[in-house]
């Protein structure tokens, strides 16, 4: 009987290829199969980050996990999309699944993990997340001492955003995209707009830092964040 392959979830960081960890690089280069999430009509961001480290002799598997779906609809689609990865593992080939940022922090690898980790030996390699990269790129300390940091997905309703922002010292609002206008309006209503810092595609060659009220809502990408650093200073 053929031994099963091993599944690796590899965080490749927010965009700068030099932010891969040494462990991620070692496992990536050793894997005979490399898989990555990709929109059907776009290049995989995760693959682009790791491209210079691929050996050229690896089997590549692309899969697509649509984001804008209700959980009930997404489940069967996700089940089908991970099948090619499972087939390689069943045939005894190790698979390194690339994931932007960190695999377990809003990472696409989580959906692979929940479907395959019970059947195949799995190792997850942490990555530098955008939550860490954005404040550094902006040049602002996020929190001091006992400050509370809250991470908020922009798609959540304005009322929930308001409630959460009223009870925290610092915040990161992620996945902005088409939700930017709603978030900006909430920040103005709460008097937080003056502290809010906008950044998109942090650490990449396309990184942009723009004053909040100068951002064009029609051009905000999914990989954009608003950072609200603590007002405390120590």
Image: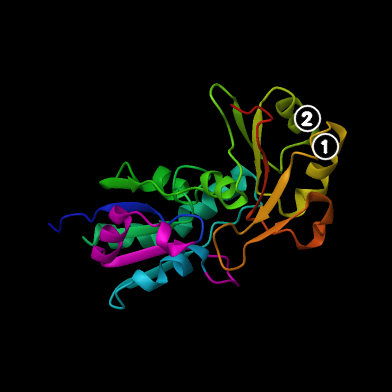
Please identify the quadrant where the C terminus is shown. Answer: top right
Image quadrant in which you'd find residue 163: top right
Instruction: Say if the magenta span includes residue 37.
Output: yes
- Numbered circle sitting on residue 186: 1
Q: Which of 137 and 57 is in front in this view?
A: 137
Count residues near mark 2 (Cα–Cα under 10 Å), then give few for <14, some for 14-19, many for 20+.
some
- Quadrant location of residue 203? bottom right
In the figure, residue 91 lies in which quadrant? bottom left
The colour style of the image is: rainbow
Mark 2 lies on a secondary structure that is helix
Number of marks present in the image shown: 2
The residue positioned 53% from the left and 24% from the top of the image is: 145
Spatial CA span between label 2 and label 1: 7 Å
Q: What stretch is highlighted in magenta?
A: 16-43
Relative to 168, 32 lies left or right: left
On screen, residue 25 above or below 139: below
**Disc assigned to residue 200:** none
Q: Residue 30: where, in percent of width, then height?
A: 23, 64
Q: Of 14 and 176, which appears nearest the observer?
A: 14
Q: Horizontal and vertical percent for residue 58?
A: 30, 73
At x 50%, y 51%, the residue is: 108
Q: Above or below — where is 180 with respect to 146?
A: below
Judge by depth and name the residue closer to the eye, 43 or 145: 145
Q: How crowded is mark 1: few (under 14 residues within 10 Å), some or many (20 or more)?
A: some
Residue 131's x, y, as percent?
55, 44
**Direction from residue 212 to residue 123 in the image, left or right:** left
Q: Name the residue under label 2.
A: 162
Residue 57 inside the magenta-drawn segment: no
């Amino acid at each position: 009987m053929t031994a099963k392959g091993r599944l690796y979830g590899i965080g490749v960081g927010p965009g700068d290829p030099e932010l891969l960890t040494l462990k991620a690089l070692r496992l990536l280069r050793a894997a005979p199969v490399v898989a990555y999430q990709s929109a059907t009509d776009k290049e995989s961001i995760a693959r682009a980050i790791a491209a210079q480290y691929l050996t050229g002799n690896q089997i590549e598997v692309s899969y697509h996990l649509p984001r804008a779906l209700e959980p009930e609809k997404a489940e069967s689609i996700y089940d089908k999309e991970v099948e090619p990865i499972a087939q390689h593992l069943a045939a005894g080939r190790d698979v390194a699944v690339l994931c932007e940022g960190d695999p377990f922090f809003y990472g696409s690898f989580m959906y692979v993990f929940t479907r395959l980790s019970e059947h195949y030996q799995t190792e997850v390699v942490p990555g530098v997340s955008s939550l860490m990269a954005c404040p550094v790129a902006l040049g602002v300390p996020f929190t001091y001492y006992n400050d509370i940091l809250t991470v908020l997905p922009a798609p959540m309703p304005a009322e929930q955003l308001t409630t959460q922002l009223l009870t925290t010292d610092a915040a990161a609002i992620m996945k902005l995209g088409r939700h930017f206008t709603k978030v900006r309006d909430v920040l103005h209503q709460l008097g937080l707009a003056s502290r809010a810092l906008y950044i998109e595609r942090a650490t990449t060659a396309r990184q942009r830092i723009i004053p909040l009220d100068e951002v064009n809502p029609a051009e905000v990408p999914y990989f954009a964040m608003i950072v609200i650093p603590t007002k405390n200073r120590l």
